[in-house]
Amino acid sequence: MGSIRILLAASAAAAAFAADAQVELAGAFSDGAVLQRGMKVPVWGKASPGEKVTVAFAGQSAEAVADANGAWRADLAPMEASAEGRVLVANGDRSDAPAKAEDVLVGEVWFCSGQSNAELPLVGGNPRFRDGKGAMRAQMTVKPLVRYCYQSDYKVSAEPKRTFPLKPVWKKFTPENLGTSSTFSAMGVYFALELHSALGIPVGIIGAYWGGTGISPWTPTSGNLSVEATRKYAEREVYSSGDFAALPADRRPCKREQDQPRVLWNEMVSPWTPYAIRGFIWYQGCHNAGDGLAYAPKMHALYNGWAKEFENPDLRLRFVQLAPWGFDRIAAIQMGQALFASEEPNAKMAVINDRGNLDDIHPNDKETVGQRLALLSLKYDYGFDWLKADSPTVKSARADGARVVVEFDNAESLYLYNPDKSLTAGLEVCGEDGQWKSAAIKNLKGDKGLVDGARLVVEAEGVAAPKKIRYLHSRPWFGCIYNEVNLPLGAFEETLP
């Protein structure tokens, strides 16, 4: 009997060793994945400590040795885009069988993140929380080379995770997948479709988002450290340190669990790092709407942290400026977002102040949002240099007697469009007394809303000596001034020389 027990124990030990020895690919590398073209592609996973692992894909191979914890990583060399579904293989020299991911494509990969307007799905069960055209779009979208991967368990973590709590599943853009009761981010779907249409190559988009969340939980520690030494913005030290008690009561963040610094990054994004991606699209800010210009350093921290953790110093960020929903200080955070965009060369901002809804914080036109983000990406990421992708921005503003003349970049011509045909523009002027007065555009050509030239000539009754001009700082906050390619002017405030 003793010899039998010894044999059984030995067999159990051998079986346990065999189980432990199986090489694994990280969850990101599942069937149908899209790998980023044109840059190194880290591939990682688990194996026995000290095990030699060989990764093979598309005619090349790379080797790694698992560390003391069984973690390994091998980097594939940059690859050309390919619509051929191929097999990614990881072989361990102590494993019984290789780990595989089948039907893997090579193309462009983006990450989609933020709060509820990023989360708002293409199709869903709530008429107030889904894209207005999503079900129609889903029925006629058969694009198997465009794929999405949504992996989120809506949890938080105090420490960065390296494994996924739920196995990611890559899905093709088909009516069956897009038409489910709760599907991928509508903004992300439209963005990916536009890229695929223009580039003609596979596109993969990854999603991690959570409604009602602030920016700090999505920011890794490295991002906060990157702005710690800078003292350019008011309140930065307070927000970086977490000493929220030093802030006015109405400026302190909520104490809900998902509002703590880093916790969403740790749980929902960190397991993806360092997956090779071109960049990320971002729609967030409602939760931080009271921050005003103080939102800019938070955006710097977010971007710097993502760029570092994804090991991509050239990481691109295409993000959405908030749309109006009735918040009376929205112009301040809109200008904070614009300030960040002007300071970070790898970031571009889509203005959507003409797509808000004063009765709903979730406007249901996400097609326009995705298209404007894609337009910026095509111009600045993919060499479509001839595109006009930027909204107008103020170049200069000066007083000319009682009138104000504003010149713009990114505009060859301007027009004014109000759904009610009122030709009111949301422009205001003040004098030395600081009293803002509604102003009218004086260089309109007739009553159709066409502006004479690419500048605005503005005058406010009762303001003889203008000192400042601003746009979209008062109800209803809707954008109505556009450039020649239908891109709206964002909120601004300028002091006149």
Image: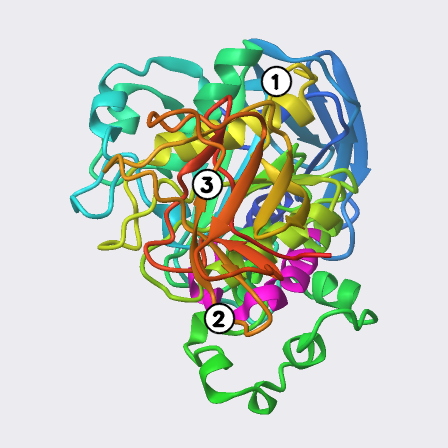
| Secondary element type, mark 2 | loop
Q: Which residue is mark 2?
A: 435
Q: Amino acid at mark 1?
A: Leu
Horizontal arrangement in the rendering, residue 318 relative to residue 439 (left or right):
right
Q: Which residue is mark 1?
A: 387
* Magenta stretch, residue numbers: 282-303
Horizontal arrangement in the rendering, residue 215 relative to residue 120 (left or right):
right
Residue 292 falls in which quadrant of the image?
bottom right
Horizontal arrangement in the rendering, residue 407 relative to residue 103 (left or right):
right
The answer, for residue 481, to whether it is visible in the render is yes
| Secondary element type, mark 1 | loop
- Where residue 67 sits: x, y (%)? 78, 51
Is the magenta region chiefly helix, strand or loop? helix
Q: Amino acid at mark 2?
A: Gln
Q: Residue at x 52, y 88 (%)?
A: 248
Q: Nearer the viewer, residue 45 or 226?
A: 226
Residue 359 falls in which quadrant of the image?
bottom left
Q: Which residue is mark 3?
A: 441
Residues at marks 2 and 1 touching, judged by CB atoms closer than 8 Å: no
- Mark closest to the chain's N terminus, 1 or 3: 1
Kindly report the distance in space between the C-alpha atoms of the residues bearing marks 2 and 3.
19 Å
- Where residue 495 sits: x, y (%)? 66, 59
The answer, for residue 169, to whether it is visible in the render is no
